[in-house]
Amino acid sequence: MYQLFVSKAVKQNLTRLQQKDQTRIKKKLESYLYPQIKQETQRVNNIEKLQNYSHDMLRYRLGNFMLF
C-alpha cells in the first residue's frame, strides 16, 4: 500500500501553471490516479518506479507534465 501526498513544493509549482493546466492536473489526480494507485499500481498507465531512491517513489506522466 502506498501513502499519497502532495508536497508544499508541488502545490507552489501548480500555482505557477495556467489555470486550465492546474484544473486538468488536479482533476486527473483526484478522479483517476489516486483511486488507481490505492488499488494497485501495477495496472496504472504512465506510472513508473524511480530508480536509486531509498523509498519507493513513483512518477506519473500526464501529457507534458511529470509528477512525482
Image (cartoon, helix red, strand yellow):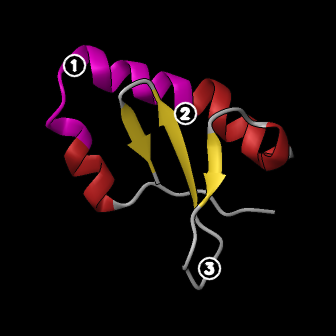
Q: Quadrant of the N terminus?
A: bottom right
Q: Residue 56 appears at what percent x and percent y?
A: 65, 71
**Distance CA(mark 1)–CA(mark 3):** 32 Å
Return the disc, 1 or 3, that comes first in the chain's sequence.
1
**Distance CA(mark 2)–CA(mark 3):** 21 Å
Label 2 environment density (alpha carbons within 10 Å; few <14, some 14–19, many ≥20) = some
Residue 20 left/right relative to 28: left
Return the disc, 1 or 2, that comes first in the chain's sequence.
1
Dots 2 and 3: beta carbons under 8 Å?
A: no
Residue 56 left/right relative to 60: right
Q: Residue at x 66, y 40 (%)?
A: 34
Residue 14, compared with residue 51, is above or below; it is: above
Residue 40, compared with residue 20, is above or below; it is: below
**In front of the other: 52 or 22:** 52
Q: Residue at x 59, y 66 (%)?
A: 57
**Distance CA(mark 1)–CA(mark 2):** 15 Å
Q: Residue furthest top?
A: 20
Disc 2: which residue:
29
Magenta residues, dominant SS class: helix
The magenta segment is: 14-29
Q: Which mark is residue 19?
A: 1
Q: Which secondary structure lies at badge 2?
A: helix
Q: Residue 36 appears at what percent x and percent y?
A: 76, 37
Return the disc, 2 or 3, that comes first in the chain's sequence.
2
Label 3 environment density (alpha carbons within 10 Å; few <14, some 14–19, many ≥20) = few
**In front of the other: 44 or 20:** 44
Q: Which secondary structure lies at badge 1?
A: helix
Disc 3: which residue:
55
- Give the residue type that dot 3 points to: His
Q: Residue 44 appears at what percent x and percent y?
A: 75, 36
